[in-house]
Amino acid sequence: MKLKNTPKIERPREKLEKFGPEFLKDYELLAILLRTGTTGKNVLEIAKQIISRFSKKRLLGLEFKQLKQIKGIGPAKACQILAAFELSKRVLKVDSSSTQPTIQTPKDIIAQVSYLKNHKKENLVVLYLNSRNELICKETISVGNRQVRRG
């Protein structure tokens, strides 16, 4: 079925505009990045195929060649997807090649900030964790008496 035959409220862009991105399913967000489908497959079908083929963690590590093997993904769409995923990794400071460490004990915290033992000034470092106590991000808030610029 062509996307333009779908009621407007069920189309990803219109949903995002009305309800916000958190309301959309993963494949709908990906469909927005892809923009268009191909002959015989609308953009939602292609996005569903990608999401069902790769786990969320594997999506961040996909390579150009892997994406191009999917029918309906050409060089331009593969580049769009890879650019969006790379930007996400950079914003979240996630290394997709490794699993995030879990913080359960004070020793786990020390392991994350052990690089500070040779620093001459005190550092205020914040460890951001998800609900499973997995490290999402490490951020230095201040060093000595000067505040680190954030943002």
Image (cartoon, rainbow, N blue to C red):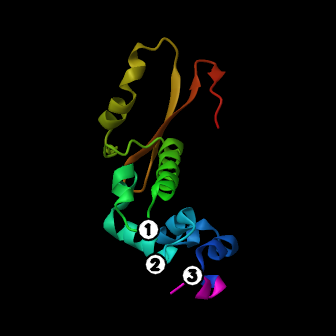
Residue 23 located within the stretch drawn in magenta: no
Question: In the image, residue 142 lies at what x, y percent?
Answer: 59, 26
Mark 1 or mark 3, which is nearer to you? 1
Chain part drawn in magenta: 1-8
The mark that comes first in sequence, 2 or 3, is 3
Structural crowding at the residue carrying mark 2, measured as other residues with C-alpha within 10 Å and reported as few (<14), some (14–19) or many (≥20) = some
Q: Nearer the viewer, residue 61 or 40?
A: 40
Residue 6 located within the stretch drawn in magenta: yes
Question: In the image, residue 75 lies at what x, y percent?
Answer: 46, 54
Q: Which mark is residue 72?
A: 1
Q: Nearer the viewer, residue 142 or 96?
A: 96
Residue 13 can be seen, yes or no: yes
- Residue type, label 3: Leu
Q: Which mark is residue 3?
A: 3
- According to the picture, the residue beneath numbered tag 2 turns out to be 41
Q: Secondary structure at mark 1?
A: loop
Residue in the image at 65% along x and 84% along y:
8
The mark that comes first in sequence, 1 or 3, is 3
Label 2 to label 1: alpha-carbon separation: 8 Å
Q: Secondary structure at mark 3?
A: helix
